[in-house]
Image (cartoon, helix red, strand yellow):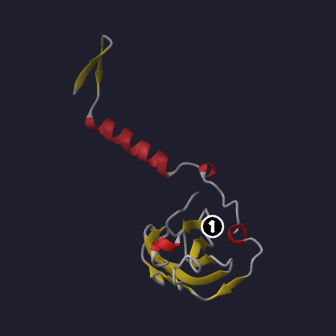
Amino acid sequence: MRTMTMGRTDSIDRRQVVAGAAGAVLALALRPAAAAQPRTETTESAIRRFAGDNPIRPGRVSLDLPPLVDNGNTVPLTVSVESPMTPADHVRRIGVFNEKNPQPNVVTLHLRPGAGRAQVSTRIRLADTQRITAIAEMSDGSYWSASADAIVTLAACLEG
């Protein structure tokens, strides 16, 4: 293929275009690890930021995620909390935390009595095999939790 550019004749063939595109893709794939963001907060500090110094008791929270995950890019997760969801007794917040992703706080969900049921379902990314913890803050100021382990065979969220 021949093109005219600013009075010059340039010759471009398909092999050069394909080689250039392949080089660009390779450069993006092999970019330096310096562009990666290191994990700046621990899981424990993220949980403490969520719950403060309040005691966190096991129970009332149910965490459902597959124990073996083929692909960490999309992991189904359901969190349920035993609560009547009345104005006097309801779930205020649910926080989900992980051990090995770049960000320890996966999600914080705010609920109100009008939600009717304290249950949420979503999909998350997991960088590696790790423990996931869900913590619920109740309207009386108490905190309840549940944890589950997930074995990831193909990791996601890798930075670096």
Looking at the rendered image, the quarter that the N terminus falls into is top left
Residue 136, quarter of picture: bottom right
Is residue 63 or residue 117 the one in the foreground? 117
Residue 46, quarter of picture: bottom right
Q: As displayed, is residue 17 above or below residue 79?
A: above
Q: Indicate the amino acid at tag 1.
A: Pro
- Residue 149, given in percent of the width and then of the height, sits at 55, 83
* Residue highlighted by disc 1: 104
Q: As displayed, is residue 134 above or below residue 41?
A: below
Q: As displayed, is residue 34 above or below residue 80?
A: above
- Residue 87, given in percent of the width and then of the height, sits at 56, 76
In the image, is 17 to the left or to the right of 25? left
Looking at the rendered image, the quarter that the C terminus falls into is bottom right
Q: Residue farthest to the front?
A: 88
Q: Residue farthest to the bottom?
A: 59
Bin the neighbour count of mark 1 within 10 Å (Cα to Cα): few under 14, some 14-19, many 20 and up.
Answer: many
In the image, is 101 to the left or to the right of 26? right
Is residue 36 or residue 15 the one in the foreground? 36
Q: Residue farthest to the right?
A: 53
Is residue 21 or residue 66 the one in the foreground? 66
- Residue 112, given in percent of the width and then of the height, sits at 53, 70
Residue 94, quarter of picture: bottom right
Q: Residue at x 38, y 45 (%)?
A: 22
- Residue 18, given in percent of the width and then of the height, sits at 32, 41
Q: Residue at x 48, y 47 (%)?
A: 28
Q: As displayed, is residue 108 above or below residue 131?
A: above
Q: Residue farthest to the top?
A: 7
In the image, is 7 to the left or to the right of 60? left
Which type of secondary structure does the marked residue at label 1 adopt?
loop
Q: Residue at x 46, y 82 (%)?
A: 68
Number of marks in the rendered image: 1
